[in-house]
Amino acid sequence: MVVLAGLGPIGVMVLALIGYRWMPKRMPITIAVWVSLVFVITGIYFYREMMHGIWEMWLLLLVDLIAAGSAWDSIWWIREHHTVKLLRYYVWWALFWLALVIIATAGNLVLAWLAIEFSTLASGALIVEMGHRRALEAAWKYIVVASVGMLMAIIGIVFLYASLQFEHLGWHTLDYTNLHAHFLAISPIVRKMATILIVCGIGTKAGLVPFHTWLPDAHSVAPSPISGLLSGILLGVSLVTIDQFVAAVPLSSHVLLSGQHLLLFFGTLSVVVGTLAILVQTDIKRMLAYSSIEQVGIMAIGFGIGTPYAQEAAILQLVFHAMIKSGLFYISGHLSVRYHSIHLPQMTDMIRRHRKLALAWAIGILALAGLPPLGLAFSEWMILYGLWSSHLWVFLIVLSISLMLGFAALMHHLISGLWGETNRSLEQKEAFGRIAITGGVSHE
């Protein structure tokens, strides 16, 4: 399955190498058509598995869908950024897509770890491609913080492997099915330490607070098509990896720092921090980045509840968020170009100046805010009901208040953007000082 799914990214690299020499102008649209074709073929080929409820196949299809959206948006984005090196961009883009495919389909903990770590290299290189100082700083911070987190995770993985080395299964020792079948052979103290290290370590790539420090900087300066993949897919599949591990190596609910308790705690903390940060943001992509932290927190709460109902709600939250947030990141990049600014106070009167983008932006923000009957409203209510059914009253109250504050914050930004007046002080400041715009529209 992993080999078949990997043919799509390999095809992109082949097309990039051929197209760069023979048809550079047609290369972006050729790649977009190929990625869309891969998405359709994936849906047809794995249709039976998806109909039998194998959610990993649905996750693979989601990865390919968001990749197709990113490929089509890259055409528009490249036209706006003429200095982009097409060959390097698409090779790193394909490698990033390949890493996401492997994470989504890996049935082995160490294989997932390797793919998550490689995704840091590929996406970091794409951020560096922007070529300005902010991008270099953000990429360096991203690589360092994420690598420290993944170092913690690999220590936990080594503990697990050492406990099960008597099986002499080699690579397959860390298959999720094998881990679950023999987790009782792992001493409780090793299970506890491995759980803390792996949840915290991979939680760094999932963007859980307090391991999220790289996320706002990296997402805000990455190319918009890459921000869509980072926020829409990478965070979600990293969190799914944590959930798969927690399910494979369970700890009793009476253990204070069990996997479920850690997901509930870090998830709630992420929701609170993300919501409060949205309120005060003036950078359009940083606002979306902090919203991603909030949304990942909601997913973590769903996984942390642990009931089948809550697990389904968390997966639905992941799917809806991936589609909505990737689209919003794509739109934000084009708005930044139109307004020659990344500042929300400068992006005003959208409904008159850029009607089509304003309409798409409004629909996306309303969906992200959880306005019924849009998707996130449904999955968030499911998670709230899961908390209610499990008698987790404190988490229920905190999440409810945070969702209301988040809705208010997003509505404020939306209304100000559609009909607000331009902040003159910021306008004058930008007239005298050229500010590096997300996506490389201008540089200091």
Image (cartoon, helix red, strand yellow):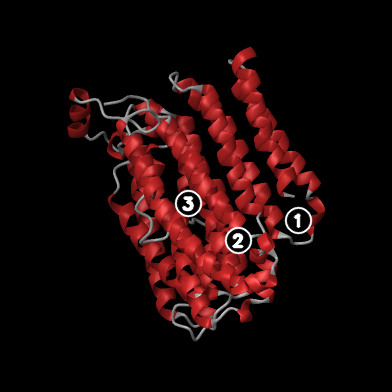
**Circle 2 or circle 1, nearest the eye:** 2
Residue hosting label 3: 368
Mark yes or no: residue 360 visible: no
Residue hosting label 1: 50
SS for dot 1:
helix
Q: Residue at x 30, y 32 (%)?
A: 133
Q: Distance between the residues labelled 1 and 3?
A: 26 Å
Left or right of 240, for residue 444 = left
Amino acid bearing label 1: Met
**Vertical order, 389 against 311 (above or below):** below
Q: Residue at x 44, y 78 (%)?
A: 257
Left or right of 443, for residue 65 = right
Residue 109: numbered disc: 2
- Residue 200 x %, y %: 44, 64
- Residue 350 x %, y %: 38, 33
* Residues packed near mark 2 inside 10 Å, few (<14), some (14 to 19) or many (20 plus): many
Residue most extreme to the bottom: 254
